[in-house]
Amino acid sequence: MPDTENEAVETENTQEQEEEKEHSRGLFGREEILTSVDKITKTNLLDVLHKAMGIHVFNASQIDYLYRYMRGQQPILHRKKKVRPEICNKIVENHASEIAQFTSDYFLGEPVTYIRRGEREQSAEQINLLNDYMFYEDKATHDKDLATWMSICGLGYRMVLPSQDDENDAPFRLDTPDPRTTFIVYHSGFGHRRMIGARIIYREKEPNVFDRLICGYTQTHYFEVLNGALTVWKQHILGDIPIYEYRLNMARMGSFEPAVPLLDAINNIMSNRVDGLEQFVQSFLKFKNCEIEDNKVSQIGKLGAIFIKSADGLDSDVDLISQELNQEQTQTLVDYLYDQVLVICGMPTTTKGGTSTSDTGQAVFLRDGWSQCEARAKDTELLFKKSEKQFLRQVLHIIQERQEFDLALAELDCKFTRRQHDNLQNKTQALLAMLQAGLHPEVAIATSGLFNDPMSVAEQSKQYLKKWEYVALTGSNPTEEDEE
């Protein structure tokens, strides 16, 4: 019986190990879900969902693998050794978590705010109100969750619905769904329209028995599909699908996903290094021309010495069989692999500059990989803004249904604030130069990158910025009499 249990455990571990290897071999980004159907109706919905679920299940399995990988559940934990299996260390250097956290923090460590685009002065007050609504709904926290999912698996989702509570501070509610249970179906033709947005909910029917409920939206209808049967199909007044997909890059790959093979190699090397050290300490004893009883061998560790006799006049000896791993050469390989991981993932390096260099400011920014990191973030910004516009269009529609609010989408722009405290003096001088040149204070404050919420800063500083209106008109600074 014990042999059977051991075989079952070994078989299960082997299957898990093979699954881990299979996932790591097939990580090339998430597949986009497409349909050629021009209009989703009650009759073709189940057919479209059935085809979409096949792709989503594959994507969800990879997303779950990357999520567990980021948490430290990596293939090295299933490591096995045939030689001296009792010495089998499983070391995880979790650089995946480091990369994912850094990427999300660098990209959206500060909240995304909305600034004015255009010349209509009346829109400034409404934009400030919109930013207040986002503050009430903790949008900054939702943005951080969204950026974290994007860093892990290359995709993130946002959902917005009208608030059902009239006493709520904002007329809408925000949510950041789990990408493992959320998907969007796009049209394969021109325009790449969103056709379906859906979330999967598993309801426990009995212990360890779950019903699968798919709740989703088309452009005009809300539906529910329970265990493959359509149970709800009703029209909604949202005017759009309230689920929005955000991408980290065009390939929909996570931040550390391209470097997974290198990360696995680093884990393998580190585990072997610790094995080598342990095997060196626990070296075998070699007995030459002598016989030792088993009970005598067990006493060696306690006595710290052993007495032997020569046999048949031959010289006898006891020696250790040991060979130490070359740690210097191994460290060179580890450093090379880690540097390649940083380059592939667009991470700044922490080893090239050191503390002895005299470079400062922009020289460090260009030398240590920060410029590549900024380039990656700007690339993601363009994709983020596209999805954010779709989200804002729905938010404005919800607000306008509740109150008088004539802010147009064309009057909004997203403001990303990163590294606002770097080169503080240069940014302050640039702000002053722009104000002296006659730029609108809102434009100058937003362009300088000194503040997280430039619209709020401009509004709070309105009375102190009046002198720049005078400078723009007269070309000189106002005197005390002019200010009075």
Image (cartoon, rainbow, N blue to C red):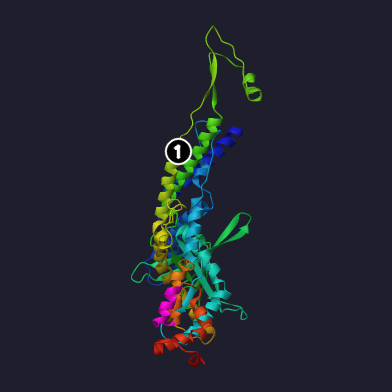
Q: Where residue 183 sits in the image (x, y, percent)?
A: 47, 64
What residue is pinned by disc 1? 328
Q: Main secondary structure of the magenta part?
A: helix
277 lies above or below 480: above
Residue 255 falls inside the magenta stretch: no
Q: Nearer the viewer, residue 19 or 420?
A: 420
Quarter of the rendering occupied by the N terminus:
top right
Visible in this render: residue 32? Answer: no
Write down the region rendered in magenta: 428-440
Give SS at disc 1: helix
Residue drawn at x 64%, y 19% is 296
Q: Where residue 118 sits in the image (x, y, percent)?
A: 41, 83
Residue drawn at x 39%, y 71% is 193
Q: Residue furthest left?
A: 190
Q: Where residue 438 sits in the image (x, y, percent)?
A: 40, 83
Residue drawn at x 47%, y 64% is 107
